[in-house]
Image: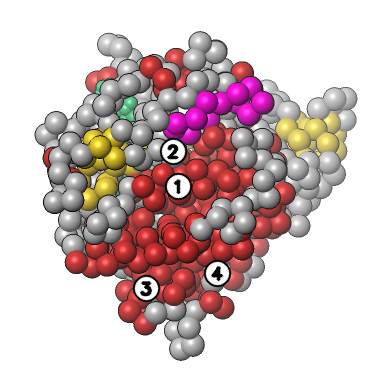
Amino acid sequence: RRQCRGRAIKINQLGFLPAAHKLAVVPAGAASRFTVVDAANGKQVFEGKLGDAARWDASAETVRVADFSTLRTAGRYRLRVAGLPDSAPFPIDANAYRDLDAGAIRAYTINRAGIALGPQVAGIYARAAGHPDDKVLVHASAASKARPAGTVIASPKGWYDAGDYNKYIVNSGISTYTLLAAYEHFPDWFGKLGVRLPESGNGLPDLLNEALWNLDWMATMQDPADGGVYHKLTNLSFDGMVMPERATAPRYVVQKTTAAALDFAAVMATASRVLAPFDAQAPGRSARFLAAAEAAWRWARANPHALYRQPDDVKTGTYGDDHVDDEFAWAAAELLIATGKDDYRALALSMPAPAARPGKPALPAGERSAEPGWADVAPLGWISLAQQSKRLPEGVDIAPVRKRLAQEAERLAARWNASPYRVSMAAGDFVWGSNAVILNQAMMLVAAYRLDPRPAYLDAAQSALDYVLGRNALGTSFVTGFGARAPLHPHHRPSQADGIAAPVPGWLVGGPNPGQQDLPSCPAGTRYPSALPALSWLDDVCSYASNEVAINWNAPLVYVAGALQSLVR
Ligand code: G3I
Ligand code: 9MR
């Protein structure tokens, strides 16, 4: 199998839009030229020279790049290099990523808590409702005068975070923001993209219908008495591999934290602006979400050091982050846009640098870029400030923010251009959720491109999508159900427990992660195919460190697929 992988031509298995930058990665060998042939009749339609051979340390492969960008005719093709097996067939198609984008959104629908999904929405993945969350207990760590430990509250709806059934505010922050931003930046595409939701046809674009399901849950995580926001809603320990309705352990809201309050404030302020024109479809939300955002902000200002500390009896995900300067900056940015108030100005423009923050290991310059992640949200604020500059009050100078975005994009584009695989990732980017690292880099590139349309920014973003759809060292698509070869055994409880062989489609799995932190939970003798960063991936349900799914990983997939459909002309 190894041999086989080493001789495979690596290419985006979903293909390309006609005007896209089109690359494939070819193992270096005797050949110096390539052709593209019609998949049906084998007729040659393009011929080109391979780039110079170069070694990619992440996979210890020596490869050459095939560039066939000027082939723009719609069709179905294969890439051919003498001495190697042909690539799998791929299309050039004006709607190459439409089904992918809708599928990536529908994955959230199927991860909704508290709703039964019929076949008209979920097809063969129809299932009963799980986790009504109408009787959730206040955990001792979250007790207050108004709500002592054991108080019962209602906190329904929302998305399950990932392969597990818990709901975490920090991770909902970046996920929900990214979906709202996708709509806000590309309203023509997402306004028309039909996803077949329970709410479809109600006058609200489907992407916003889906986001609203989680926003309504998030709103319930705020304590009305003081504006503080619970960090998570969770079981005490992870459920077994069962369907949602069989997972009935008691659920708790746990500890109010500064990070939760600020991520909540940022998303609610964003939602108030995005939903403002839709008061008929989402009655009262815009105003209510803005008031909730300001109350959460006030709580965070009064409690700036409420860091998450996992209570002894709680074993589920932590999303712990001891550096909240970026959360302050992001929330302030969204609140400045939403209200214009002077109070938010200084922090909105504070621009904390991830690598320079205390407690974080110092990384060589350029080694890790400033793409957003659940623990690094400052770039989300820059994206909003740059895109919403017209809404900012007189005299707010966002030139430094634009400059920062441009610098990051330049750095990513330079790395992309120099990379043997033509990816913007640095060696240190192969972490838990690495597939989302590269897609979040693409989101940064797209944001910079919208300010200053340099072709390299868009081409590097295209390459990021190519990477997760097959132009990677494993030659696999990392999105369930999409591509000739795709993950079959994600760490996702419904996919494992539903009795259906094919996993729920439309999920991006975490991807290569040399940390391999899950091996102790895998059956004895389980091995990753390699210790090399780009090959550290295991298509096994035990592999939560490389093969889980998560709402924050799918969000940039939704964004980038829609961005390319909108911008590649
Ligand atoms: O950022 C550092 C980097 O500086 C360092 O060089 C590198 C070397 O190990 O580690 C990097 O940190 C890693 C971090 O992810 C990067 O985002 C940590 O080691 C790694 O443990 C951490 O993993 C997180 C994981 O939970 C464990 O806490 C993932 O980000 C996070 O996505 C994941 O989230 C889980 C939830 O807890 C529960 N629900 C499922 C979800 C997805 O797996
Ligand atoms: O299923 C859990 C997954 O969602 C988390 O990302 C992961 C790391 O926190 O943990 C998984 O749960 C495992 C637990 O940590 C250890 N025992 C096996 C569990 C998987 O079934």
CB contact under 8 Å: marks 4 and 2: no
> Whole-percent x and y of residue 561?
62, 46
Residue depth check, mark 2 versus mark 3: number of the one nearer the observer? 2
Q: Quadrant of ligand 1?
A: top left
Is the shortest distance between ligand 1 and the CB of mark 2 under 8 Å? no
Q: Is residue 129 above or below residue 306?
A: above
Is the shortest distance between ligand 1 and the CB of mark 4 under 8 Å? no
Which residue is drawn at the image coordinates 36% and 40% (left, top)?
155
Q: Is residue 120 magenta?
A: yes
Tell me the residue that label 2 is attached to.
157
Q: Is residue 516 magenta?
A: no
CB contact under 8 Å: marks 2 and 1: yes
Question: Residue 33 — which label?
Answer: none
Disc 2 to disc 1, how far (Cα)?
Answer: 7 Å
Question: Residue 348 — which label?
Answer: 3
Asked which secondary structure carries label 2, the reply is loop
Disc 3 to disc 4, how far (Cα)?
Answer: 14 Å
Q: How many C-alpha atoms fall within 10 Å of the one at disc 2: few (<14), some, or many (≥20)?
A: many
Residue 480 occupies quadrant: top right
